[in-house]
Image (tube, rainbow, N blue to C red):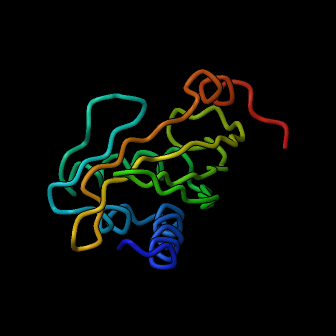
Amino acid sequence: MNDLAGLTKFATRYAEAWCSQNPASVAAFFAENGSLSVNDGPPAVGRAAIVEIARGFMRDFPDMIVTFNKLEPQSNVIAFHWTLVGTNTGPGGMGKRVRISGYELWEIDNDGLIVESKGHLDAAEYQRQLKLGVDE
């Protein structure tokens, strides 16, 4: 998984999985004991825990579209840049439209799966959009 073309296909499919409303399809991109964390929060470890993270986003944003923006290979990680657009109409949602960009720093194993993903987004801007929405 060292070639950029292969990584680009992987990233495209990963973004599509986030749009699928099938949380297991997101977890399938991770190694069995892979982890996903957001903004230095505690990691969700293992595919079952990753399913729950994905399920939460899919529940909160039933119309969620995640777009793959670009990849930036770095020394031992790959930065996957994305944009999420959706309406927060899930349980307890305020019905506001959100458009937020961020990135994940991936460590990929020899089988081509994510061992560790550290996600980052502007938490204050995300919270603002959940309350007030975004002008598109």
Name the residue nearer the viewer: 122 or 107: 107
Residue shown at 37% from the left, 42% from the top: 118
> What quarter of the picture does the N terminus occupy?
bottom left
The residue located at (74%, 32%) in the rendering is 133
Q: Nearer the viewer, residue 68 or 60?
A: 68
In this rendering, position of residue 105 left or right of residue 107:
right
Q: Which of the 4 quarters of the picture holds residue 95?
A: top right
Q: Is residue 123 left or right of residue 24?
A: right
- Closer to us: 34 or 16: 34
The one nearer the camera, 34 or 98, is: 34
Image location of residue 17, percent across then percent down: 46, 67
Residue 44, compared with residue 108, is above or below; it is: above
* Vertical order, 82 against 93 (above or below): below
Residue 12's place in the image compared with 124, above or below, is below
Quadrant of the drawing holding the C terminus: top right
Image coordinates of residue 78 in percent, x first then y, are 43, 55
